Image: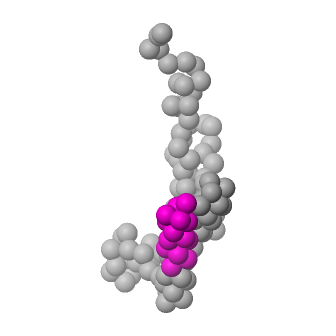
Amino acid sequence: MSATPSREELQALRTPVPQHCGWCGRAVEQPAAAGRRRRYCGRSCRQRAYERRTAVQRTGLPEDAVVLSGAEVASLQDRLFQLRCAAEDVATAAADGAEPDELEKLSVEVARIARDIEALR
């Protein structure tokens, strides 16, 4: 057996990890041509990021500071509570000897809630 990787394996290694918008977090398509990589998915996200940077500079907050409103914090806390409850449901079902189908349904729900939490904005 040869230790040389196949063409498909080499291609998989070359495939870049998708970049995400610096503002909204959506995947950003990178142009095939050479040049600077895109940081934002569109003009509006680039503008919002600029507005945030200039506001941060005026307030003296650190460059990497994240400012959330009270409503955003409450929403994030609610979604984290949902995630914890869903994870506890999986643990309880596993301890009770639940069927694999039931565990799969519960784990899919945990993954869905986690994806929702990833989108902070």
Q: How is the image coloured?
A: one colour
- Residue at (49, 64) in percent of width and height: 95
Q: Nearer the viewer, residue 45 or 118?
A: 118
Where is residue 75 shown, x and y percent of the image? 55, 83
Q: Is residue 91 magenta?
A: yes
Residue at 54 percent of width and 88 percent of height: 71
Residue 111: % across, % down:
58, 61
Residue 2 point in image, percent of width and height: 47, 10
Q: Position of residue 36 (x, y in %)?
A: 52, 45
Residue toward you, 1 or 21: 1
Residue 5 in magenta stretch: no
Q: Is residue 27 visible?
A: yes
Q: How many marks?
A: 0
Identify the image quadrant of residue 21. Answer: bottom right
Q: Main structural element of the magenta stretch: helix, strand or loop? A: helix
From where the camera sits, is residue 72 visible?
no
Task: Give the magenta-colored segment's residue range.
Answer: 81-97
The image quadrant of residue 48 is: bottom right
For the residue pair 59 and 9, the one nearer the viewer reads as 9
Q: Residue furthest top?
A: 1
Residue at 57%, 19% in the rendered image:
7
Residue at figure coordinates x 33%, y 74% from the top left = 62
Relative vertical location of residue 49 with respect to residue 39 in this rendering, above or below: below
Q: Residue 63 sits in which quadrant?
A: bottom left
The C terminus: image quadrant: bottom right
Point out the residue furthest to the bottom here: 70
